[in-house]
Image (cartoon, coloured by chain):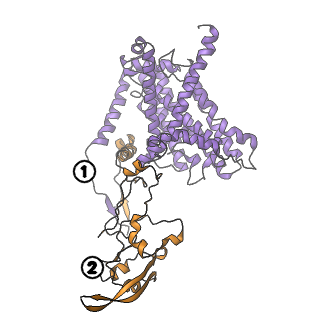
Chain colours: A purple, B orange
Amino acid sequence: MNTPLMHYLGWPVIKFLVAFIIVQVIVAAMNWIERRLLGLFQARLGPNRVGYKGLLQIIADPVKFLLKEDIVPSSAEKVAYYLGPMLPLIPAFVVFCLIPFGPPPTFTVTRVNVGLLLILALTSTGVYGIILGGWASNNKYSLMGGLRSAAQMVSYEVPFGLSIVGVLMICGSLDLVTIVRYQEVNAWNFLPQILACFIFLVAMNAENNRTPFDLPEAESELVAGYHTEYSAMKFAFFMLAEFSMMLVNSCLIVTLFFGGWTLGMFGIGLTTDVLAKMGFMGGLLGTLIFTTKVMMFMLFYVWFRATFPRFRFDQLMDLGWKWMIPLALGNIFVTGIFILAGQERLMYWIGIITIAAAAFYLFKPRRIESRKVAHAS
Amino acid sequence: MLVEYQKQKWSEKFLVLDLLEGLKTTLRELFKPKVTIRYPEERMEPTDRFRGMFKFSYDRCIACKLCAVACPIDIIYIDVHDDIIEEGGKKKKVKVLDRYDIDVKRCMFCSLCEEACPTKPKSIWLTTKTYELATYDRNDLYFNMQELEYWDDRPKYTGLPEDDSKAIEGQKQITGGVE
């Protein structure tokens, strides 16, 4: 069983296939979850007709996409048009090789010591498909959508990457497993890196073209953006890639800031060692914890979509360049000072105080203040 | 009108409190009961003054034709003949209704016929709480006397297979005429 071939090729492929199937089920389910939750957020019921509470929608949607007529615009650039939906899928699937779903070595597909860098490199190629698809459709709205996507990606890759740097400085490694192991011994990274965590959360919304940042597919401005001319399974591929990328980014934020598969801080609680003592079941439990955390962030996406209105394009650029990048740089600077002073534990208080203050302001009983109304003369 | 909002403190701005407030609001909305009515399975009960389908009572009608006169678009067609009946040795002339048709497809549900009706209780009324008036044929919307009186008996639309009686039992049924 432990021949080199099995060790280097067999097991990774099997593990990847298992992870891949689970991920695809989650992605398909996510489509239903999003529509249903959005409905509930907006005082309606959402899709509830097919099966129990509309659960069979998960199957009905792909079947519909498969059976629909596939229309290719006669003036489309054929090669680029077909490549468009395929390109974002490849990195979105490959990335799941690198994410540690549970305690290593059983529950990680591969352990690369620059895993984070590889994930960043792979995920940022996803935008090529969108640009190519928008360009090849020979439709001005599609082209606009593609261009917007490119501009947005350029603007938000920077704070996305910079927000991770703080974590790397604290943990001192690009290996995702090491980062998680660091977090279970010390605090989860969202405490010392609360600002980076916030920037990452915003930037990952922008990366995935989700609503407040869904300008590439803004319905009210560009018919449907880059996928205007795509129908049937090609459109489904775009959707699949988008949801897969959402899942990847949720996995990333959980791994980087929220302790991955562990459920404990300062070495107390369900840490990797405790899970290792439980054997295979412990590993499964770790994976379950990881999946739960990831699903919570997937629900965050829907929650954001239900809450925030879309940005104007200049506002989007303002936020990216004038706020996110300086804040991320400042965060790196502050983190550097703390590390230089050897007082990393003091940084926990930043997170604790920030969260406490936000909670205090948010939940304090307020008297309703009448708005000052000035009549225009 | 200019509305001046309170200026945020820097601390509130730094903590992105307005965004959090928005998230709080939507989260509260998530758990509120929904107003949607799943139509064929659940039905809305109209208010008491709702104007629905006509209901006609042959027994109460005195064939005075006032409703036909009141109708602004003349869609009530009434034919009457005189008849002589004996009541307690006296000969009495009564009007007998031959035809009472309403062309409902042209009706605007103004309820003026109901107002004009002199009998008490009214012999034509619209407050029946019925809104399922759609048909597949426009001729089906021409109602004669019997149909106006007994449309209650026709099967109601359920949106479900007819033999699925178990599902129909669980439904809220609409109420018929209100008197």
* A70 or A185: nearer the viewer: A70
Q: Position of residue B151 (x, y in %)?
A: 41, 68
- Above or below residue B131? Residue B125 is below
| On screen, residue A96 above or below B164 | above
**Which of the 4 image quarters holds residue B84?**
bottom left
Q: Residues within 10 Å of mark 1 (few under 14, many from 20)?
A: few
Which residue matches tag 2?
B120
- Closer to the camera in the image, A12 or B178: B178
Q: In terms of secondary structure, where does tag 1 sit?
A: loop
What is the chain letter for disc 2? Answer: B
- Residue B13 versus residue A104: which sits nearer the camera? A104
Residue A275 coordinates in the image, percent (x, y): 41, 15
- Quadrant into which the N terminus of chain A falls: top right
Quadrant of residue A62 in the image?
top right
Taking depth in this image into account, of A229 and B34 the one nearest to the observer is B34
As displayed, is residue A112 above or below residue B70?
above
Q: Which mark is residue A367?
A: 1
Residue at (25% x, 91% y) in the render: B89
Q: Quadrant of residue B4?
A: bottom left
